[in-house]
Every structure is written in C-alpha cells, then in structure tokens.
Amino acid sequence: MNGKDIRINRLLHHNKMLCVPLDHGITMSEISHLAKFKNAVNTIIANGASSIVVHKGMVRFLPPLNNTGLIVHLSASTEKHKPVHKVIICEVAEAVSIGADAVSIHINLGNEYEKLMLADFARISKDCQTYGMPLLAMMYIRDNDNKGIANISSAKHSIRIASELGADIVKIDSNWNCEELSSIIKDALIPVVVAGGDILERGEFYRRTADLMNCGIFGVSFGRNIFMSEKPAETMANLAKIVYSETSTTSATPTIPSP
C-alpha cells in the first residue's frame, strides 16, 4: 500500500464515501447555516461522515476530526461574477502543509472557460502524483450562464475526462434515475460519487439516497441537505445508516429511516 492508498482509506468508512462539502462560504453570500462552523463540523463528524471538504482558510477552525478525512478544495468562484469559471486558489503543496488527506477541484465542462479549467486540472493532477495526494474531481456540465446541460453521454464523457487526467474519485450531478445512473457508471474506470443537488423533503432525501446507493455508486457528497436541515444530527445519522448499509451493495433496499 502506497501513500495515496493510505490517504484514500482515510476518506472512507466501510469502504464507502459519505462526504460532506462545507466549501459553500466562498460561492454563496447567504449561508448562515455555517456561521457556527465548529458546531456544524462536530455534528457532522459525530454522526458518521467519512470525510469533509473545506477551503484552506477554514482548516484552522476545525475541531479534531478523529477518523474523518480532510479534503481541501482547491477551486473557487463567487456568485457575484462568473461562477461557471472556477479558478485555483490553493496549491497541492499548501494542502499538504495544512494536513489534507486529499484535495478536490471543480471543473465545469461545456463553456468558454473549459480549456482553462482543464489546464488547471492537468497541473494539479501532476502535483498530486508528486505528493501521493488523492484527487477528487467534481465534474459538471455547465454552459456560460452556469446552467446544467448534462445528458447521459456528456456525464459519461466527464467521468472519462476525470480518469484520463488522473483523478482518483469523480463526483457528478445527481439528476439521474437508477437506470440512467447505472448506465453512466457501468464503464467508469474510477469510483463515482454523486452530488446532493437541491434540498429535498426528508423522506424523499432518504429514499433518493437509498436508490442512488443501490445503483452501485461509491458514495455520496451531500452538503446543504445536511447542514441546512432542521435536524442536522438526525439527518446525518440516518444518512450514514443508508450509505454504510451492507444491503446497499446488493439488490436489497437499505432500511429507510422515517423522516
């Protein structure tokens, strides 16, 4: 087992990924649910998160993470300008110096800035190889107005691009039914995790997560559906039961908690 393998294992529980992104503070101006940052992180790690995603400046405010993996996000944009164009605001070496177990980048394909983001991807991937650092690539299909334009073919292509450029794990949109998602990930060369998307009613959220896991994905990366929940601790704990359920890797349906 090499250094990268050791770090990837820190991101998982029961060989599944339940990642909670907490990197919304740069992009979104109204994110009061993360105002009490340490409390939010404590709730998330105490109730089953296998990893979290934060920007570099927030690492100093983290409580002890125990066995929850730390992913430092290297990309950013704000809603005030061109959110479709993600720029690099942290380097791999800096992430190493502040204790990251992995790094992540956000790439939007299908717009005029695509070539710039792909060039950043290639450079970051090279640095990750140098440092033995796992790379999570968040791959989305977005036009110049940051509107989603994904179809099954483009989703498959985005996963292949992530593989070709050296990502270890790829994150994609969640706007798929199980048949579509199964087709998308069938030939994936690297593990696929799915984003949370819009905020859902609790029962629907749990059912949706169970469906996603039964499609054969590696895990989920859910943010707002957890930390903007009325009961984040309960939501996180129930989500962990679904994601880590042994039945979620079989044809059986995981037990879905009551909302």
Image (cartoon, rainbow, N blue to C red):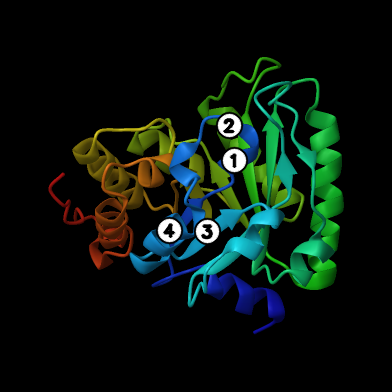
Q: Are marks 2 and 1 in contact (CB under 8 Å)?
A: yes
The disc labelled 4 sits on which kind of residue? Asn
Residue drawn at 69 percent across, 82 percent down: 2
First along the sequence among labels 2 and 3: 2
**Residue 81 position in % (x across, y down):** 73, 21
The residue beneath circle 4 is 39
What amino acid is at disc 2? Met
Q: Nearer the viewer, mark 4 or mark 2?
A: 4
The secondary element bearing badge 3 is classed as strand
208 relative position to 97: left or right: left
- In the image, 87 versus 156, the foreground residue is 87
Q: Which residue is mark 3?
A: 52
Nearest to N terminus: mark 4 or mark 2? 2
When the figure is inspected, residue 72 is found, relative to residue 97, above or below; the finding is: above
Disc 3 marks a residue whose amino acid type is Ile
The residue depicted at 36 percent of the width and 65 percent of the height is 48
Q: Which mark is residue 28?
A: 2
Disc with the residue nearer the chain's start (3 vs 1): 1
Q: Residues within 10 Å of mark 2 (few under 14, many from 20)?
A: some
The answer to whether the residues at label 4 and label 2 have Cβ atoms under 8 Å apart is: no
Considering the numbered disc 1 on the image, is that residue within a helix, a strand or a loop? helix
